[in-house]
Image (cartoon, grey):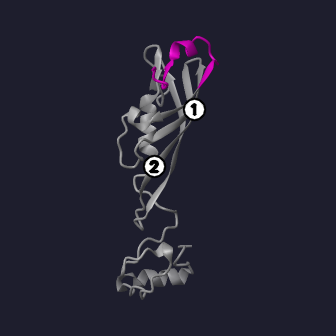
């Protein structure tokens, strides 16, 4: 079976303005991605639009990749979908410093997809943006509610900064 991420570039480059859409699910194993952040058997949903112009091919679209992991604050299992926005240019003669070189008659999108999948999946995920983490005294998960421990005693080394915060009228919870 031909690789759906390899596109005939010669066909696109014949006429400026010609385009092609690539919509396919590709198994992460087929991309050579073996990373604990991704569920076994997961695939990336690829939705790309390729359009030729006078000096190359513009590739736009998005990738959607499921991930899972452990919250870095409360250690709960969490998961989500990483969405990668794609805006790249391929050129035969590099005139744009941000463009990729287009060699031969085939445009191989596999390295681009693999790179974005690996870069956009969270390395240290959070179960939610405002995750309070664990109680430093008893280790209870604070997202489930207060644990009943007495608040930790204030560290005297921070007294000067606490006084300055009080003087400026900032809220200690939000920092504003």
Instruction: Please say whether residue 93 is visible from this viewpoint.
Output: no
Please name the residue that numbered disc 2 is placed on.
67
Q: Which comes sooner in the sequence, label 2 or label 1? A: 1
Q: Position of residue 31 (x, y in %)?
A: 40, 33
Total label count?
A: 2
Instruction: Please say whether residue 68 is visible from this viewpoint.
Output: yes
Residue closest to the eye, 1 or 155: 1
Residue closest to the eye, 139 or 118: 139
Query: Considering only vertical position in the picture, is 80 above or below 58?
Result: below
Residue at the image point whose x is 48% and y is 46% from the top? 66
Q: Position of residue 71 (x, y in %)?
A: 42, 62
Q: Position of residue 141 (x, y in %)?
A: 43, 74
Neighbourhood count class around disc 2 (C-alpha, 10 Å): few under 14, some 14–19, many 20 upward = many
Neighbourhood count class around disc 1 (C-alpha, 10 Å): few under 14, some 14–19, many 20 upward = some
Distance between the Cα atoms at labels 2 and 1?
A: 22 Å
Looking at the rendering, the stretch of residues picked out in magenta corresponds to: 1-21
Residue closest to the eye, 68 or 106: 68
Residue at the image point whose x is 42% and y is 88% from the top? 150
Query: Considering only vertical position in the picture, is 41 above or below 154?
Result: above
Q: Is residue 53 magenta?
A: no
Q: Secondary structure at mark 1?
A: strand
Q: Residue lying at the far right in this picture: please name it.
A: 17
Picture disc at residue 132? none
- Dividing the picture into quadrants, the one containing residue 157 is bottom left
Q: Residue lying at the far top in this picture: please name it.
A: 14
Picture disc at residue 60? 1
In the visual, does 176 lie left or right of 122?
Answer: right
Q: Quadrant of the C terminus?
A: bottom right
Q: Position of residue 62 (x, y in %)?
A: 56, 38
Q: Secondary structure at mark 2?
A: strand
Residue closest to the eye, 113 or 23: 23
In the visual, does 47 lie left or right of 68?
Answer: right
């Amino acid at each position: 079976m031909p690789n759906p991420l390899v596109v005939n570039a010669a066909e696109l480059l014949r006429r400026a303005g010609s385009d092609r859409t690539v919509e396919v699910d590709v198994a992460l194993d087929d991309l050579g991605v073996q990373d604990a952040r991704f569920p076994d058997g997961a695939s990336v949903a690829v939705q790309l639009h390729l359009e030729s112009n006078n000096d190359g091919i513009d590739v736009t679209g998005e990738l959607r990749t499921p991930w899972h992991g452990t919250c870095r604050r409360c250690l709960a299992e969490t998961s989500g979908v990483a969405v990668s926005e794609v805006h790249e240019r391929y050129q035969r003669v590099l005139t744009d410093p941000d463009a990729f070189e287009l060699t031969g008659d085939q445009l191989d999108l596999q390295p681009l997809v693999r790179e974005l999948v690996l870069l956009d999946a969270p390395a240290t995920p959070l179960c939610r943006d405002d995750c309070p983490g664990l109680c430093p005294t008893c280790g209870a998960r604070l997202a489930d509610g207060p644990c009943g421990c007495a608040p930790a005693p204030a560290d005297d080394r921070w007294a000067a900064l606490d006084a300055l915060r009080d003087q400026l009228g900032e809220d200690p919870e939000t920092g504003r």
